[in-house]
Image: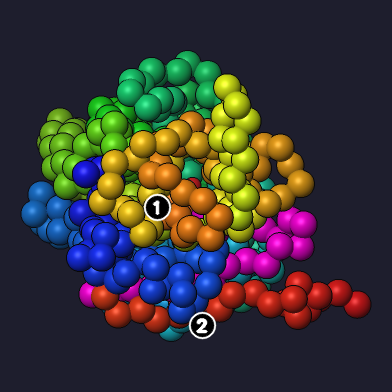
Amino acid sequence: MAELLTENLGVNAEGHLTIGGADTLSLAAEYGTPLYVMDEQEIRKNLRRFHESIDKHYGGRGLVCYAGKAFTCLEMCRIVASEGDGLDAVSMGELYTAVKAGFPMEKVGFHGNNKTDEELHYAIEHGVGHIIVDNLSELRRLEAIAAEMGAVPHIMLRIKPGIDAHTHQFIMTGQIDSKFGFALETGEAFEAVKESISCENVKLVGVHCHIGSQIFDISPFEAAAGVMLDFIAKVRDELGYEIPGLNLGGGFGIKYLSTDDPKPLEAYMERVSAVVKEKCSEHGLAQPYIYLEPGRSVAASAGITLYTVGARKEIPGIRTYISVDGGMTDNPRYILYQSEYEAVAAARAGEERTEKVTIAGRCCESGDLIGENMPIQHVDSGDIIAVLATGAYNYSMSSNYNRVMKPAVVFVNNAEARLGVRRETPEDIIRNDV
Ligand SMILES: *Cc1c(COP(=O)(O)O)cnc(C)c1O
């Protein structure tokens, strides 16, 4: 029997693939394809892996702020809120979604390297917990907007800690080239702190770093925490201001392929909190309140995408193409990064994957593939296939290219299914046309 990627996937008595206990063929029949399916229990389990490890290893002095850019909608906000976790938003659209979901806005962090005045105003008006300031022009605009509103929003500064995280190793870079944040080694970050604490209408409550994404190793995170605490100590020593919060970002790797071997999510906070405690005692600092911002590692394993196979094209001696009723419009990760996925024939999920196929989307781009040389059971026209671990950065990066309508999102919870986002209709496609 073929190995399934994650524990929330299974095979029922009929041999059909299940997610969260729900039969994927029944979901496809009821809701149509392409279809995003999100397993609520898996989302909750992933969030708990983070917040319970903060409880266990750091006395609960921290907040998990789920990075909504990985996947969000009203129902996702409600689930995250019901776990007691926070949220990261990066745009008016994400902030608005949180507001409309009734999300506790004091647990929301507002990110972005080019926030508009309108967005900053909206964030303050709705009592966002902290705004992560990316650059000095933003700091000055925010100070002016806050003064006008008679508010004192809490801010963090986004710092480039000089750590370049690769999948399996890390290097300390002398020179960092990134559009995000203030550089440490040029003194830019220190100047930004100085200016922030002199502002009357913002309150500096933390420093933030985010070193990358899909990182399997914990050592770059440990290194980043160390660098950030050294910086907090330097600020305390030279400016007499002790920054109370440390935001360590997200980026924890997940299993896209059976051969991927990320560290268990629990291990992250265990090791990082040890570094934080050690550094604090070395510098005589109070242990900061910690923020974590996992996105992919919360949503990816919770999601699969179901497609119906259209044509099967065998090009002798070259490859077999399987075309599906979705593609880069619902999963742009292959065309963006040549990312890899596993696929399963939903009706024969327990059988060996005996073929290798290229799964192609329906858009007018040759690069519109879900993947190449993907092992799968024999599939033909009309079969349903599932692409696994698509819960993060698929729906949120989906588009209407070719005026393709976006699929529905269905949540399953202990075998019960409910609609989370309706499938788009042709009417939606022309909604804003005049
Ligand atoms: C993208 C991002 C995250 C989430 O990253 P994942 O790799 O999805 O965990 C967290 N924080 C910031 C600032 C980000 O830009």
Residue 26's tag is none
Q: Earlier in the sequence, mark 2 or mark 1?
A: 2
Which numbered marker is on residue 100?
Answer: 2
Residue 385 or 422: which is nearer the viewer? Answer: 385
Is residue 374 something one can see in this rendering?
yes
Is 402 left, or right, of 97 in this rendering?
right
Q: Is residue 376 left or right of residue 291?
A: right
Q: Quadrant of residue 253?
A: top left
The location of residue 236, given as percent across then percent down, is 31, 40
Mark 2 touching mark 1, by CB under 8 A?
no
Q: Amino acid at mark 2?
A: Lys
Task: Name the quarter where the C terminus is drawn.
Answer: bottom right
Asked whether mark 1 and ligand 1 are closer than 8 Å, the reply comes as no
Q: Which mark is drawn over residue 345?
A: 1
Kindly tell me whether residue 209 is visible in this rendering.
no
- Relative to residue 402, is residue 319 depicted above or below? above
Q: Is residue 426 magenta?
A: no
Query: Who's the residue at 74% across and 76% down the image?
Result: 426
Asked if the stretch drawn in magenta spans residue 396, the answer is yes
Q: Nearer the viewer, mark 2 or mark 1?
A: 1
Amino acid beneath label 1: Ala
Residue shown at 62%/50% (left/top)?
A: 311
- Residue at left offset 48%, top offset 44%: 158
Span colored in magenta: 394-414
